[in-house]
């Protein structure tokens, strides 16, 4: 135990020095932060935990809209805090509270101090300091709809194909027509509108390196092969209603179910993958646990993706979140398919213990050039601290076990860490960054 602990400490120190490519963030822009200050309720996955701990709908809503009634929001947060602080999310937040905000115990008094520090903490140009100096993060893959300016450290991932894929009413279709500047009267025209819209975004937004598919929040990620004829039949269901939007002020818009629309959605998903292929983009896809609560975990099984990954062999698929709780299934896909990559974003704080255990296992059968070591998946730049520290701990712990067992020597273990944290995402997202 003593030996393991000293190996861990040695590796942990080295890993702390390694530059990181952060593969997934929802960081709000500096401008947004200054104009719409965050509250302590935005620190991390607070909302998910509150509901899991039994918060009522009213309490959850109060927490979500902290600015409306700050006193009530604080009361809700603190009521459940003794139960949520022990989870991975909670421990990540505690680490941020301690190291970033200098708060050891969160209570009524320190809560307001924290709120004030969050409100005033971000000034123009401060992201440079946070990412580069404090975190040693060299690049961030940003998942955000924002049109705001971001510093050059940010690269983009676009999830805008969802506007098309999830359209479920005639009203949605009209919105797509104005978004894309095309008229849409068939599945084929919908594909063309999606395609030209994404092409326009590629030109407008700087540094786009990936498309993002987060449909696991809405439906199963099994995307069947379908035909244009089947897609068209589903498309026609959007027209089942007589009137378009001009009449909707007095007639409710009927929405079609995703089951009815599946052939159209599947068709458009395949087309979005083909778009990634033709434009040299990676295809990031949510697998495993969904944020929030009451979602259907079986929708997000990594093995639902096998047909897609094996058909589009030239597209690098980046599978998110350790596929938790289908972690072994997720690992096997990274092993079986040359074009499937395994991204640990968010996973380190979903369960630190599972991540340590699984890294030990994954590295037994997945080549170490297939795993991406860190993505924060957070809105607040300050919250990345706790998550990144836990990620470094987890990686060092798993590798220390391997070194002590005699699976790897220390030098190799450190090379594996550097590959996961820097070289693998650098290569797959074609960032061309130098290590130093
Ligand atoms: Zn995310």
Image: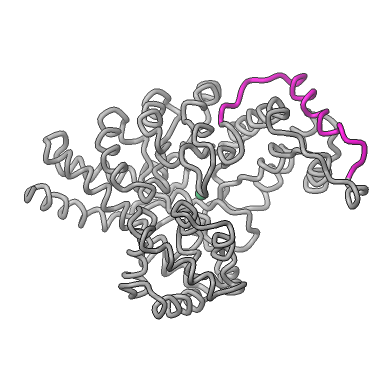
Classify residue 34 by image quadrant: bottom right
Return the x and y of residue 150 as percentages of the image width and height: 56, 62
Instruction: Work out whether 340 lies above or below 163.
Output: above
Return the x and y of residue 29 as percentages of the image width and height: 56, 64
Return the x and y of residue 359 as percentages of the image width and height: 28, 39
Q: Is residue 237 magenta?
A: yes
Instruction: Work out whether 154 lies above or below 357.
Output: below
Of residues 407 and 349, the one nearer the viewer is 349
Residue drawn 77% across the image and 39% down it:
255
Residue drawn 8% across the image and 47% down it:
1
Q: Which residues are magenta?
A: 221-244
Residue drawn 46% across the image and 66% down it:
77
Instruction: Work out whether 106 lies above or below 376.
Output: below
Q: Residue furthest left?
A: 2
**Left-right relation of 305 to 90:** right
Q: On the rendered image, what quadrant is the C terminus found in? A: bottom left
**Left-right relation of 49 to 407:** right
Classify residue 103 by image quadrant: bottom left
């Amino acid at each position: 135990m003593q030996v393991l602990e000293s190996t861990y400490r040695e590796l942990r120190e080295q890993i702390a020095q390694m530059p990181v490519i952060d593969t997934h963030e929802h960081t709000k822009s500096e401008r947004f932060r200054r104009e719409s200050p965050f509250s302590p309720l935005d620190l991390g996955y607070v909302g998910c935990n509150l509901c899991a701990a039994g918060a009522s709908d009213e309490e959850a809503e109060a927490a979500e809209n902290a600015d409306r009634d700050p006193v009530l929001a604080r009361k809700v947060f603190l009521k459940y805090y003794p139960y949520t602080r022990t989870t991975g999310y909670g421990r990540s937040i505690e680490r941020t509270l301690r190291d970033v905000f200098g708060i050891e115990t969160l209570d009524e008094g320190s809560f307001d101090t924290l709120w004030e520090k969050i409100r005033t903490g971000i000034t123009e140009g401060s992201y440079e300091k946070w990412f580069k100096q404090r975190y040693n993060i060299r690049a961030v893959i940003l998942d955000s709809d924002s049109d705001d300016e971001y510093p050059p450290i940010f690269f983009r991932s676009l999830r805008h194909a969802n506007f098309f894929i999830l359209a479920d009413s005639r009203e949605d279709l009209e919105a797509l027509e104005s978004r894309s500047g095309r008229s849409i009267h068939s599945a084929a025209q919908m594909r063309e509108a999606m395609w030209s819209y994404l092409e326009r975004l590629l030109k407008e937004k700087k540094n786009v390196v990936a498309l993002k598919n987060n449909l696991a929040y809405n439906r199963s990620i099994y995307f069947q092969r379908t035909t244009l004829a089947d897609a068209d039949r589903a498309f026609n269901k959007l027209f089942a209603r007589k009137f378009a939007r001009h009449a909707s002020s007095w007639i409710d818009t009927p929405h079609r179910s995703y089951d009815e629309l599946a052939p159209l959605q599947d068709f458009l998903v395949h087309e979005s993958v083909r778009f990634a292929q033709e434009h040299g983009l990676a295809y990031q896809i949510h697998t495993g646990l969904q944020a929030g609560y009451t979602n259907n975990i079986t929708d997000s099984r990594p093995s639902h993706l096998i047909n897609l990954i094996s058909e589009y062999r030239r597209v690098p698929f980046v599978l998110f979140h350790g596929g938790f709780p289908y972690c072994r299934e997720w690992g096997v896909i990274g092993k079986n398919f040359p074009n499937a990559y395994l991204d640990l974003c968010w996973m380190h704080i979903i369960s630190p213990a599972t991540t340590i255990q699984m890294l030990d296992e994954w590295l037994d059968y997945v080549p170490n050039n297939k795993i991406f070591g860190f993505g924060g998946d957070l809105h607040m730049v300050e919250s990345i601290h706790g998550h990144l520290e836990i990620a470094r701990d987890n990686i060092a712990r798993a590798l220390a076990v391997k070194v002590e067992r005699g699976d790897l020597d220390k030098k190799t273990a450190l090379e594996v860490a550097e590959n996961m944290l820097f070289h693998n995402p650098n290569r797959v997202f074609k960032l061309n960054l130098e290590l130093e």
